[in-house]
Image (cartoon, grey):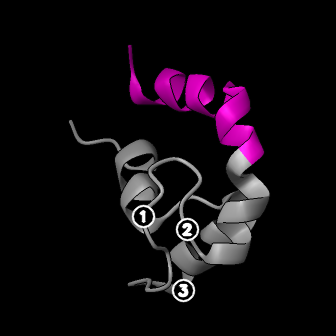
Amino acid sequence: MNRLQELIEILSDKEVQARTSSARINQKCKICGNLADTFHTPLAKVEYHLSIICEDCQNYYYRYEN
């Protein structure tokens, strides 16, 4: 399974969807549960506020290495 398919499955999971509000309030990632209060780039911070996905998970799912 490629990473995009994996991400779609994770984001479709009802438990992950249920964690969104709590993760946003506690500045955590709704996927891995890690703290998401430090970002290396402004874009990663903006993406977190949109998706509630930490920079590590963003890097894993959004940046594909060949």
Residue located 49% across and 74% down the image: 36
Residue located 56% across and 58% down the image: 53
Q: Please name whichever residue, 38 or 43, is drawn nearer the observer in this view of the structure.
A: 38
Of pointers 1 and 3, the one earlier in the residue sequence = 1
Q: Nearer the viewer, mark 1 or mark 3?
A: 1
Q: Callout 1, which amino acid?
A: Asn
Q: Nearer the viewer, mark 2 or mark 3?
A: 2
Q: Residue 47 location in percent, x, y? A: 63, 67
Residue at numbered disc 2? 28
Q: Which residues are magenta?
A: 1-18
Residue located 42% across and 64% down the image: 34
Residue at numbered disc 1? 34
Q: Residues within 10 Å of mark 3 (few under 14, many from 20)?
A: few
Magenta segment main secondary structure: helix
| Residue 9 on the magenta segment | yes
Of pointers 2 and 3, the one earlier in the residue sequence = 2
Of pointers 1 and 2, the one earlier in the residue sequence = 2
Residue at numbered disc 3? 42
User: Residue 64, relative to residue 22: is it above or below?
Assistant: above
Q: Callout 2, which amino acid?
A: Lys
- Between the residue at mark 2 and the residue at mark 3, the CA separation in whole angstroms equals 17 Å
